[in-house]
Image (spheres, grey):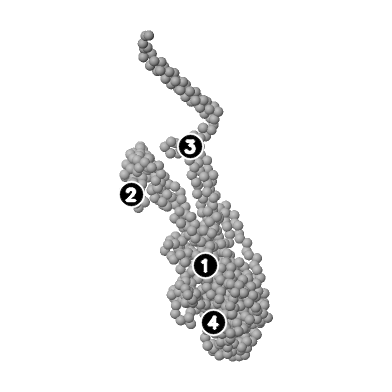
Amino acid sequence: MPLSDGSGGVLEASGRRLRFGILIALALLVVLGLRLVFIQGVDASGHAQKAMDERLKSVTVKPERGSILDSQGRVLAASVARYDLVADQRLVKDYRVWDDESASMKDVELDDSLQKLSALLGMDVDELRERMVGDRPYKVVTKGVTPEIKEKAIDLGIPGLIAEPVSERSYPNGAVAGSILGFVGGDGSPLEGLELSQDDRLAGEAGKRTYEIAADGIRIPNAEFSETPAVDGDDVRLTIDQDVQWFAQEAIAEKTESYNADWGNITVMNAKTGEILAMADSTTVDPSDPSATDNLFWRPTSLTQSYEPGSTGKIATFATALEEGGISPTDGWTVPNHQDFDGQVVHDAEPHQTYDMTTAGIFTRSYNTGTVQVAESVDDQTRYDYLKKLGVGDPVDIGLPGSNKGILIDPAQWGSRQRLTTMFGQGYTQTTLHLAQILQTVANGGVKKSPQLIDAYISQDGAESVQPEDAGIRVFSEETSSEMLKMMEGVVQMGTAAPAKIPGYRVGGKTGTGEAAGIGGYDGYTTSFGGVAPLDDPQFVVAVSVHRPQGDWHSWQVEDTAAEVLSYLLTKYNVPPSDEKPQNYDVFTEDPQKRPW
């Protein structure tokens, strides 16, 4: 048997591998061919679109934030044009510019331009070079430069340096109305005040800009471009009068400092409409630098801080008795210094002899024993219902965050002591804004108008959406309100608020001092005053509170501060002097009317 030739087997195996390789290659060619047919024929548009999508870049177009204006249209907060300087480091290098003198191109070294730019921006040149030179397509060089600085920087002609428009919030009046306006963060996000609560109207709607870029990330000139314009935010016009706000801030700051108190505030309101003309704090945040101010003052304390009102709470007590208890201002009462009511002894602040007094006289001298006698003419539920009608125990919605509703529990939960103390402004709490709301109700013939801070929204085309004036809710009759104003005039003419007098004008008001609750009990006081002027045609109400004043309580008075603000208002708004003489009631049932306290 002849031996087989081994080389033949090798050749046969090699041939098989070759044929197999050719088959694989042919299969791949078929697949690639089919794929090419699919791309160019069947799905040509889809792949073209995918390629386009990869070359398109979309950027957000930011809207301009609306301004906040005072009642006269003066700017309290606005966005100002600023620019971020940004570098495409891949393009930053030596360059050539046209020289007018030689009428030719000249070479410019990058280092020379960086020196000029560093001086312009006030930056260290080495730090500037680190931000400008490299291989990053986007690097922020500096933020928030003015349009003037931007123009000078771009005029240097450095390749790759561009300016991106941004918006920066400006508060041209500093701390005036700062706690009302609020502020925004470094990234422009709203954090407090109207900036936060009205952000939906102020912010506007962002747009979008889409353009085509090359493989190196640079925009292709004259290539596809589309833009959805941004819709700028609305302006918000307030009822606040910038001048009144400033005056009230200065007045309450001076008063609070004089008593070394924790805080003080003033609320000024239009008596007929409920429009808020000022909400001033003793310390006011500057929206441009909020961290410099205690966060207690980031919001108006007239809105956020509640306290036991003390004798200013007697306004509601006496008005309710006149309205529902069959009581008149001239009814007679025997008023001792202290008196037992079903086992609970009520004292007046200072010892005095027993007097025969009118209802108005008790209010004038603010005697607690007489107040309880008058208040007993109505039941507890009725008194509670009227406090609720006046807004006590409910938040006051003026479009700002942080409204403190105060504390007013159901009368079914009042103990034998609390049912008496609520008659003279203790055992419940309210804010200064609540006090202003009560004053407005009485001054407006018994009709309560919801306090209003926002007057209108103004779109960027100038169209105004004026907020409707509240129709109001009648709480007291016109007769009761008229009688209460005369009784409040007695407080100024013959009672505890003589410093509230304003020459030529009839003024009414009520003083109050309530104990301030601390940890474990009462450890201070809040002194307050609510005033109305002029009484023959009430235009303004002013509520003032100072929390934890130091010193002897006999020396505390805030009614003089209220008179300063009222005098300013009467002059500013050209309110004519009163034609009538004071119409307050007698204090005592028989003369003489001037007796020891």
Q: Which residue is mark 3?
A: 54
Give the residue type at disc 1.
Answer: Thr
Residue 152 percent location from the top left of the image: 39, 48
State left or right for residue 445 relative to residue 161: right
Q: Secondary structure at mark 3?
A: helix
Marks 2 and 3 sit apart, C-alpha to C-alpha, by 35 Å
* Label 1: element kind: helix
Of the two numbered discs 2 and 3 on the same chain, state the one appearing first in sequence: 3
Which of the two discs, 3 and 4, labels the residue nearer the N terminus? 3
Residue 42's place in the image compared with 446, above or below, is above
Residues at marks 4 and 2, CA–CA distance in whole angstroms: 68 Å
Determine which residue is flagged by label 1: 304
Task: Kindly identify the amino acid type of the residue bearing the numbered disc 3.
Answer: Glu
The residue at 56%/87% (across/down) is: 338
Spatial CA distance of label 3 from label 1 is: 53 Å
Residue, disc 2: 127
Per the model, the C-alpha gap separating discs 1 and 4 is 28 Å
Quick check: 116 above or below 540? above
Q: Are marks 4 and 2 in contact (CB under 8 Å)?
A: no
